[in-house]
Image (cartoon, grey):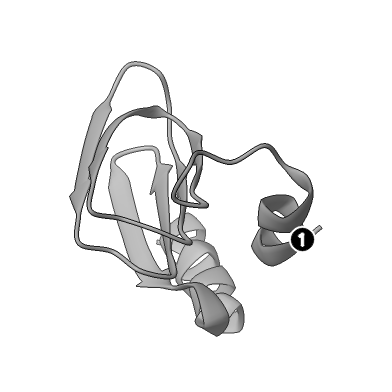
């Protein structure tokens, strides 16, 4: 499924963030933050963003630009 649908159906925090990572999140809302439990993600001031960690790469993209985010992920996997 899409990241947007994942955000829609998953349990979120009080600021409407879906966080499945070891993360400290400040002044951030309507975002999806996904990463491994062995890397700390610190995010501040995001509104409507996707943050994903893939191996040693961190991708940050506007949530409504999911097609672009998928392209970035595919580019990283191809490199």
Q: Secondary structure at mark 1?
A: helix
The spot of residue 78 in percent (x, y) is 49, 62
The spot of residue 63 in percent (x, y) is 50, 73
Q: In this orientation, which residue lies closer to the viewer: 68 or 10?
A: 10
Task: Count all numbered tags in the image, as a single digit.
Answer: 1
The spot of residue 22 in percent (x, y) is 35, 24
Q: Which residue is mark 1?
A: 5
Report the residue at 43% width, 35% height from top.
35
Report the residue at 23% width, 53% height from top.
27
Q: In this orientation, which residue lies closer to the viewer: 23 or 70?
A: 23
48 vs 64, left or right, is left
Q: Estimate how packed mark 1 is, as few (under 14), some (14 to 19) or many (20 or more) residues with alpha carbons within 10 Å.
A: few
21 vs 10, left or right, is left
- Please say if 21 is above or below 15: above
- Image quadrant occupied by the N terminus: bottom right
- Image quadrant occupied by the C terminus: bottom left
Report the residue at 50% width, 38% height from top.
13
- Please say if 64 is above or below 1: below
The spot of residue 3 in percent (x, y) is 66, 59
- Please say if 50 is above or below 43: below
Report the residue at 67% width, 37% height from top.
11
The outermost residue toward the top is 38
């Amino acid at each position: 499924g899409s990241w947007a649908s994942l955000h829609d159906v998953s349990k979120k925090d009080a600021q409407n963030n879906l966080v499945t990572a070891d993360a400290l999140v400040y002044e951030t809302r309507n975002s999806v933050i996904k990463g491994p439990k062995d890397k700390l993600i610190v995010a501040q001031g995001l509104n409507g963003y996707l943050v994903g960690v893939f191996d040693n790469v961190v991708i940050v993209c506007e949530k409504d630009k999911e097609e672009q985010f998928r392209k970035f992920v595919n580019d990283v996997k191809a490199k």
